[in-house]
Image (cartoon, helix red, strand yellow):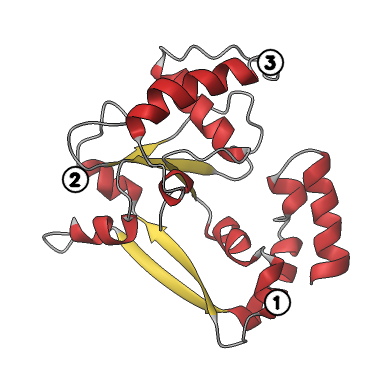
Amino acid sequence: MRTAFHRTGRANLTKFMHQDIPALYRHLTGLTTHRFNLQDPNDYAAFLALVQHHGYPTPLLDWTLSPFIAAYFAFRSPTLRTMPPDARVRIFVFDGYLWNETYERAPALSPGFLHATVLEPLALNNPRVLPQQGFSLVTNVDDLEWYIPSMEKDGRKFLTAIDIPVAERPRVLRELELMGINAGSLFPGLDGACNQMKERFFEL
């Protein structure tokens, strides 16, 4: 359980904040209808969430408030069809409310201590956040699967893993489709609509 940023092998937060984000901002200003003010923490968080949802590595780890949407993302990869039926997908359940009550929020991306801070970014220019019921963890920790359980004390449980057999993929995706959870609903726009029909006709 690592952010896309930490998986790159180039996880230097100082360089990310002072070089990457200003360059990315200059590159994207002609493509966004909202002019992000990177000096405003709300705009900064919204900008990170936007580029994360469009494939840029950030120190944000996406979560959803819905267990059904989490199941969709766990099972959506067509490569699971080639895996042995006894293989499993894993869905993590994180108690962000308890975490917020227990640990301080970091005031910046790179404070002088290890942290995982719950973030609910504004959905500026980002129509995916609301249907995905998304929130994020912003972190300077490389391995959250180790870090979060290491912070569990006094009987508090922050992280739980649920494993489901890969063989359940066709049934899970069919049932989620009946609930209206598919690429078309979670990725508004032409790409999502095409992927919804691709899932329906080729991958179930």
Q: Is residue 106 above or below residue 169?
A: above
Q: Any mark on residue 102, and which?
A: 2
Q: Earlier in the sequence, mark 1 or mark 3?
A: 3
What residue is shown at x 62% (from left), y 19% (from top)? 27
Front-lying residue, 14 or 136: 14
Q: Position of residue 82 (x, y in %)?
A: 69, 79
Q: Any mark on residue 140, and which?
A: none
The residue under label 3 is which amino acid type?
Thr
| SS class, disc 2 | helix
Q: Nearer the viewer, mark 1 or mark 3?
A: 1
What residue is shown at x 19% (from left), y 42% (from top)? 103
| SS class, disc 3 | loop
CA separation in Å, label 3 and label 2: 38 Å
Q: Position of residue 39 (x, y in %)?
A: 41, 12
| SS class, disc 1 | helix
Q: Any mark on residue 81, and which?
A: 1
Q: Any mark on residue 33, and which?
A: 3
Query: Which image quarter is the C terminus in?
Result: bottom right
Q: Position of residue 17 (x, y in %)?
A: 39, 25
CA separation in Å, label 1 and label 3: 39 Å
Q: Nearer the viewer, mark 1 or mark 2?
A: 1
Q: Earlier in the sequence, mark 3 or mark 2?
A: 3
Q: Position of residue 88 (x, y in %)?
A: 53, 78
What residue is shown at x 40% (from left), y 47% (from top)? 6
